[in-house]
């Protein structure tokens, strides 16, 4: 007879998670972020307390942002480890839906465990319960369904016997990787069951590496050998596969230049002769010019979002072929691409072996030299020390202060575009950008998560005043836990990036910058004092020179360090970039809008004719 152990469902969940290990012997779930409420405090809270030495529990200040910290941890870990996040039912749970969408868009693992209603339905409707008048099984947690890779509701203790293995498979699968949601009914959490002891035996989850199909590999080799202007688009999958060395060896052996997506940036050092730099809407001329002329595009580990492809208007060569080397079938066949389904590392190694001594023609060094000649001056300190600094000059100041251990991170607004173009990433993992969901509010919590995943790294977070106002509460968490990272707040008095987009589509400046918002003239937020009130060390500087002086002191400071600087909301890097499809009104009384609509019509026509 098999042995059993009597546990509550919550105790069983915690014990199971403790037994799930990485190849290095560490628990795959590195910790649990928790805000307790009546839906999880008695059941799951008690179980976490009993196992706090093996599975640490961290207290956040906001459900969304503590989930962002967990997601950043997973991203910086290369998806080798993940975290769990638990909340009560109702608003605590729905606060996490945005973070789940972020993880889903970026293919990043996080385990969401929101409390759920009573499985017995005896007390219905409980506090915070959403009632569906026509469906008795719907709860607020059903909001997670479209943004979860695997969703389940635990309404019986024995449900864990099937749900938890499915959850771990999803979290660790290279193709299906993404958020898992287990809605955990609050009475079920506390209910006991005789679980098989074998269920809690340690299990090692190894990274699966899918090899290439022979026919697909042969097709890709034939296409590369026939190409005169091939280019590689390097995506986040290169990092998650640990394929950065394989990519470097491949491009050097076959002389194929590389264009970097936001997620793929830093796969090659910025100064590698075959690294053409950023691609797409926030890209540079070397990469975009090559992509326009390319007769062969080898997309490695990228989901090819519209910022990468210029809304699919970038690849203009009518004879262009696209090969998608990707572990996921969904991404490998996008836009009628020819798939090469494989792990990025194994796929590149197999391609390299099959290509032998083949080398593509051409030299891209002149394009790179011309590009840096144009953009490097933009990051220099201003000659006029009284001038309001630009975002490019802020990037330059941080770059000059960076070292080999620095991780530059950001998520939304102006800085992602400037960093994609201008930041010089020296080694893998030194650039952390959440641009799959472009989620304002990721930055501060994300910086904390990066530092928790990689404590030796010098983490510098770029955030604007707008995103700071959306989500800053985990600054207090970082101060409480003594987690050290630097935050550079660029205060341009509003949403500068969207204000420029508004102007770029012919519209009047409206409701983005505070100066164009109702009552905006009354806004005078002191971000340095606010950060200080939450426990951070902070100061406001008035020039790029003072910013550099402040950054030089960051290693001396324990806990979060916030430096605020006012910036000009209007300038941006004019060089590079490509068309991005944004809906411009077909009818307007403004001639500026109609002019932009004509440009939009022409660009879309050109794209559709490709």
Image (spheres, rainbow, N blue to C red):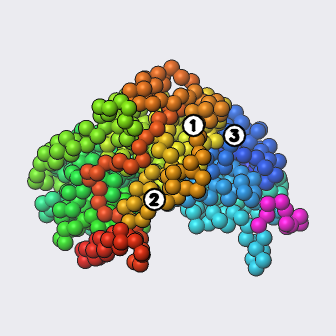
Q: Which residue is mark 1?
A: 527
Observer-side mark, 2 or 1, equals 2
Q: Position of residue 417 (x, y in %)?
A: 37, 50
The disc at residue 82 is none
Q: CA distance from mark 2 to mark 1?
A: 24 Å
Residue 127 on the magenta segment: yes
Observer-side mark, 3 or 2, equals 2
Residue 195 on the magenta segment: no
Assess disc 1: are there few (<14), some (14-19) or many (≥20) residues with their C-alpha within 10 Å of its C-alpha: many
Name the residue: 40% across, 60% down: 503
Assess disc 3: are there few (<14), some (14-19) or many (≥20) residues with their C-alpha within 10 Å of its C-alpha: some
Q: Which residue is mark 2?
A: 509
Local secondary structure at mark 3: strand
Range of magenta residues: 121-130
Q: Position of residue 62 (x, y in %)?
A: 67, 47
Sequence-wise, which precedes: disc 2 or disc 1?
A: 2
Sequence-wise, which precedes: disc 3 or disc 1?
A: 3
Q: CA distance from mark 3 to mark 2?
A: 41 Å
Most extreme residue toward the top, as rendered?
Answer: 556
């Amino acid at each position: 007879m098999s042995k059993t152990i009597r546990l509550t469902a919550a105790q069983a969940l915690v014990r199971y998670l403790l037994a799930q290990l990485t190849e290095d012997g560490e628990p795959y779930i590195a910790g649990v972020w928790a805000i307790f409420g009546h839906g999880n405090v008695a059941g799951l809270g008690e179980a976490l307390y009993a196992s706090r030495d093996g599975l640490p529990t961290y207290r956040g200040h906001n459900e969304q942002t503590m989930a962002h910290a967990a997601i950043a941890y997973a991203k910086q870990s290369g998806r080798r480890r993940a975290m769990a996040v638990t909340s009560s039912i109702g608003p605590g749970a729905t606060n996490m839906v945005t973070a789940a969408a972020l993880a889903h868009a970026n293919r990043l693992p996080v385990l969401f465990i929101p409390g759920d209603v009573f499985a017995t339905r005896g007390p219905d409707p409980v506090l915070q319960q959403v009632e569906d008048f026509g469906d008795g099984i719907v709860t607020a947690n059903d909001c997670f369904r479209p943004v979860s890779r695997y969703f389940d509701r635990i309404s019986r203790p024995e449900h864990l016997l099937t749900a938890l293995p499915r959850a771990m498979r999803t979290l660790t699968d290279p193709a299906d990787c993404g958020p898992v949601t287990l809605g955990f009914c609050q009475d079920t959490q506390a209910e006991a069951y005789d679980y098989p002891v074998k269920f809690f035996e340690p299990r090692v989850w190894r990274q699966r590496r899918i090899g290439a199909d022979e026919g697909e590999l042969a097709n890709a080799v034939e296409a590369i050998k026939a190409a005169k202007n091939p280019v590689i688009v390097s995506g986040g999958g290169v990092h998650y596969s640990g394929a950065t060395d394989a990519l470097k060896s491949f491009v050097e052996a076959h002389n194929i230049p590389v264009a970097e997506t936001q997620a793929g940036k830093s796969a090659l050092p910025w100064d590698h002769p075959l690294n053409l730099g950023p691609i797409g809407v926030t890209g540079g001329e070397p990469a975009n010019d090559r992509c326009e002329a390319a007769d062969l595009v080898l997309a490695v580990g990228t989901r090819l979002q519209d910022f990468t492809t210029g809304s699919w208007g970038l690849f203009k060569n009518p004879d262009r072929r696209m090969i998608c080397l990707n572990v996921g079938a969904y991404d490998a066949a996008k836009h009628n691409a020819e798939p090469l389904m494989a792990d990025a590392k194994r796929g590149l190694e197999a391609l390299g072996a099959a290509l032998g001594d083949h080398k593509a023609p051409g030299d891209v060094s002149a394009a790179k030299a011309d590009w840096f000649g144009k953009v490097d001056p933009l990051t220099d300190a201003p000659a006029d020390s009284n001038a309001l600094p630009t975002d490019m000059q802020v990037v330059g100041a941080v770059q000059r202060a960076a070292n080999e251990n620095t991780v530059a991170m950001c998520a939304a607004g102006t800085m992602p575009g400037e960093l994609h173009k201008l930041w010089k990433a020296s080694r893998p993992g030194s650039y952390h950008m959440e641009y799959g969901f472009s989620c304002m509010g990721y930055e501060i919590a994300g910086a904390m998560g990066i530092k928790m995943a990689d404590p030796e790294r010098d983490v510098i977070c770029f955030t604007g005043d707008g995103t700071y106002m959306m989500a800053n509460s985990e600054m207090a968490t970082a101060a409480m836990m003594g987690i050290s990272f630097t935050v550079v707040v660029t205060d341009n008095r509003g949403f500068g990036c969207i204000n420029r987009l508004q102007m770029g589509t012919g519209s009047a400046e409206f409701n983005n910058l505070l100066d164009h918002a109702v009552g905006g003239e009354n806004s005078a937020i002191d971000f340095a004092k606010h950060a200080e009130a939450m426990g951070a060390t902070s100061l406001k500087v008035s020039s790029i020179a003072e910013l550099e002086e402040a950054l030089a002191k960051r290693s001396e400071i324990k806990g979060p360090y916030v430096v605020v600087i006012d910036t000009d909301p209007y300038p941006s890097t004019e060089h590079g970039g490509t068309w991005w499809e944004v809906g411009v009104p077909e009818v307007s009384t403004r001639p500026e809008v109609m002019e932009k609509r004509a440009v939009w019509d022409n660009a879309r026509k050109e794209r559709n004719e490709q």
